[in-house]
Amino acid sequence: MLTSAATRITMISSILATTAIPAFAATEGRSNPTDLIVWGFIGFCALIVIAQITPQIRNLNKQSKSAAEEAKAVKQLL
């Protein structure tokens, strides 16, 4: 289970790294005063996404711990 999770994380991070390269290359050739506003907007959107995902991850961890405790209790009863 651990190796499959590590493999998935590696695969996802490599995909994200290779798709970000063209975005960095595209911003190099031009200079526009609105670039700061655009990057600020993108950063704000990323902040909103992280703020939405973080509680879901915490809830998922709590649910998995409670499910493991319930499974352990069922095993002890049998």
Image (cartoon, rainbow, N blue to C red):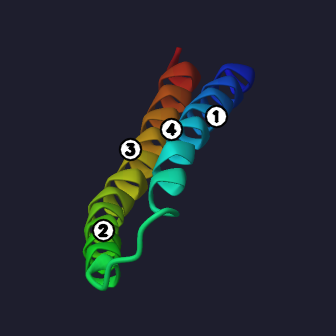
Residue at 30 percent of width and 85 percent of height = 33
> Label 1 crowding class (10 Å Cα cut-off): few <14, some 14-19, many 20+?
few
- Label 2 to label 1: alpha-carbon separation: 21 Å
17 relative to 74, above or below:
below
Secondary structure state at the residue bearing disc 3: helix
62 with respect to 4 (left or right):
left
At which x and y percent is residue 58? 41, 57
Q: How many marks?
A: 4
- Label 4 to label 1: alpha-carbon separation: 9 Å
Considering only order in the chain, which callout, 4 or 2, is on the residue closer to the N terminus?
4
> Label 3 crowding class (10 Å Cα cut-off): few <14, some 14-19, many 20+?
few
Tell me the amino acid under the disc marked 1: Ser
Tell me the amino acid under the disc marked 2: Ile
Q: Which residue is mark 4?
A: 19
Considering only order in the chain, which callout, 4 or 3, is on the residue closer to the N terminus?
4
Q: Which residue is mark 3?
A: 63
68 relative to 29, above or below:
above
Q: Which mark is residue 42?
A: 2
10 relative to 22, above or below:
above
Q: Which residue is mark 1?
A: 14
Considering only order in the chain, which callout, 1 or 2, is on the residue closer to the N terminus?
1
- Label 1 to label 3: alpha-carbon separation: 29 Å
Tell me the amino acid under the disc marked 3: Gln
Residue at 56 percent of width and 31 percent of height = 15
Residue at 63 percent of width and 27 percent of height = 11
